[in-house]
Image: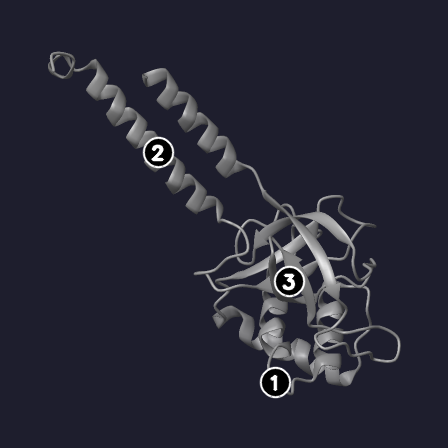
Amino acid sequence: MKKLAFSFLLAVGLLCASPITTTVKLVDAGHPPLSDGHYYVGPYDLLINGQTVAALCIDFSDRTSTGTSWTAYLSNVGGDISDTYHPTFDVKYQEEAYLYSLIVQPGADRKDIQHAAWAITGGYTANSAAQAYIQMAKDNYSTFDFTGYQIVSGINGWNHEQEFLIYTPPSDPVAPEPASLGLFGLGLVGAFAARGRGADDPRERDH
């Protein structure tokens, strides 16, 4: 039983060390659809694990078509971003999370906020209105609560699907957090270990 508990603990450790992947589908290009004259701007709708979530596109360099499904990494903003398209852009992703909080508000200036997000990650030249949102993000990201914000990055990286930023309440995440998986696994390990101690106890065998 000790060997079983050890093996399970090892498996849990490997699981926690592995990035979370999930299937993603672009449901619509804009929520509701809105064009700046050349491109549709966010928030878009992504279907992730059967849950539809609003998404801010943060990747101007790639393309994704409505109805396309792909496999993506989910990385927490403010956490480990080694599986994103820009592993050194921790602050930029945090600034974009702040912009996400603005673009989903009723009556938001969706075009300029979207342009600001594209400019922060790179590949888009922002006009003066978008530059104002970039400055706003720089001024406010450091005090912003990133809990629930995640980066959706295609597993094939560059020249594949676009990268998006989403938000889901911590009470209803689109995918389990690595820490939650680890705690669940440790709980099972404890149960296995307790069961093993009971079987090895001579007093238990006497019953």
Which mark is drawn over residue 165? Answer: 3
Q: Nearer the viewer, residue 86 or 146?
A: 146
Which sits earlier in the primary sequence, circle 2 or circle 3? 3
Residue 44 on image: x %, y %: 70, 69
Q: Label 2, on which residue?
A: 188
Question: Residue at position x 69%, y 83% from top?
Answer: 132
Relative height, residue 179 to residue 190 (above, below):
below
Q: Nearer the viewer, residue 16 or 32?
A: 32
| Mark 2 vs mark 1, CA separation in Å | 45 Å
**Residue 64 position in % (x across, y down):** 81, 59
Which residue is located at x 65 percent, y 84 percent?
Answer: 108
**Mark 1 falls on what kind of element?**
loop
Q: Residues within 10 Å of mark 2 (few under 14, many from 20)?
A: some
Give the structural element (helix, strand or loop) at label 2.
helix
Q: Quadrant of the C terminus?
A: top left
Please report whichever mark, 2 or 1, sits nearer to the chain's N-terminal start: 1
Asked whether the residues under the numbered discs 2 and 3 touch, taking CB atoms below 8 Å apart as contact, a structural biologist would say no
| Residue 85 seen anywhere in this rendered image of the structure | yes
Picture quadrant of residue 89: bottom right
How far apart marks 3 and 1 lie (CA) works out to 18 Å
Label 2 to label 3: alpha-carbon separation: 33 Å
Q: Is residue 84 visible?
A: no
User: Which residue does the image show at 71% across and 70% down from the upper left?
Assistant: 117
Residue 10 horizontal/vertical position (percent): 44, 26
Residue for badge 1: 106
